[in-house]
Amino acid sequence: MNEENEAAKAGVKDLTITVVYDNNPYKEGLQTAWGFSCVITGPEKTILFDTGGDGSILLGNMEKSAVDPNSIDTVVLSHIHGDHTGGLDSFLRKNHDVTVYLPKSFPKKFKDNVLSLHPKLVEVEQSLKICDNVYSTGQLGRLIKEQSLIVRTDKGLIVITGCAHPGIVKIVNTAKDLLKDDILLVMGGFHLEWATKGKIEKIISAFKQMGVRYVGPSHCTGHKARTLFEKHFGTNYINVGAGKVITAVDLQ
Ligand SMILES: [Zn+2]
Ligand SMILES: [Zn+2]
């Protein structure tokens, strides 16, 4: 293995995750709306993960977060729901010089519409490497198929989920099995809005058993679950909402 590959293997050092779309507020001036989207910079490629539900809100929040749409190389869509894919059209009209990774199970009509805007398209079935240190879990789940993003940092893995329809514990386990590394942070929608306190606490203890160090539950996690995660993770709970920027400093 050459030196360059060795460096890639060590994980991303200067990672920045900027949340540009969320129904939870964080930074003043950004618009909140149901959905999720974040931008990951630091790896070989700059990645837009999900696009929220509305293109003008997405682009407006990107501008307010000083994220240039033309700096994006790669778009990853977690799953078909409109609150994750609704902003794609507007984004591609700004910058179609990107590769879009979407679950293979997406309807043909959706794929055709994406292709009409001329990005490159990759249909994801199994887990795959997107670029050095960035992977997709592959499409998981039965009814609603969903992929999650895994970023390898020098301190462990970061798992980013859209809605976590296949189950958040299953997703984290998949990431761990795939890359055989510690889990530094799990963030995004955990889909626990309607879960009972008992179920949420089971998930929290599963997280602890898997050695998850930081959590940033947002979007469809729900207030009850967010409060419980905060209670159990204390200072390792990250309050994620529109405009939140996570860097290595937050993940010591
Ligand atoms: Zn959602
Ligand atoms: Zn969903």
Image (cartoon, rainbow, N blue to C red):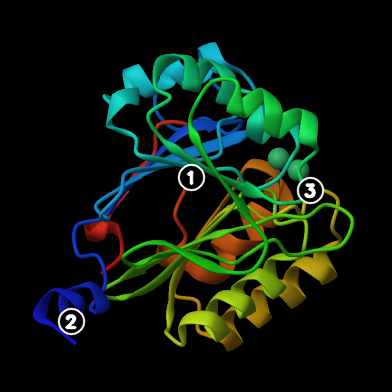
Marks 1 and 2: CB-CB under 8 Å? no
Between discs 3 and 2, the one toward the N terminus: 2
Q: Position of residue 36 (x, y in %)?
A: 58, 37
Sort mark 2 into few (<14), some (14-19) or many (20+) by Cα contacts within 10 Å. Answer: few
The image position of residue 66, as x and y in percent, is 26, 24
Q: Residue drawn at (10%, 80%), measured in percent from left and top?
A: 3
Is there a contact, CB below 8 Å, between mark 3 and mark 2?
no
Helix, strand, or loop for circle 3? loop
| Nearer to us: label 3 or label 2 | 2
Q: Is residue 29 visible?
A: no
Answer with left or right where residue 88 lies relative to residue 80: left
Residue at x 55%, y 75% (from the top left corner): 175
Taking 161 as reference, is 199 left or right? right
Above-or-below relation of 198 to 189: below
- Disc 1 residue crowd, few under 14, some 14–19, many 20+, Cα 10 Å: many
User: Which SS class for mark 2?
Assistant: helix
Work out whether residue 167 or residue 107 is closer to the camera in this orientation and state it.
107
**Which numbered disc flags the more N-terminal residue, 3 or 1?**
3
Mark 2 — residue? 6
Q: Amino acid at mark 2?
A: Glu
Asked whether the viewer can see residue 245, the reply is yes
Look at the image and tell me in which quarter the C terminus lies: bottom left
Residue marked by disc 1: 240
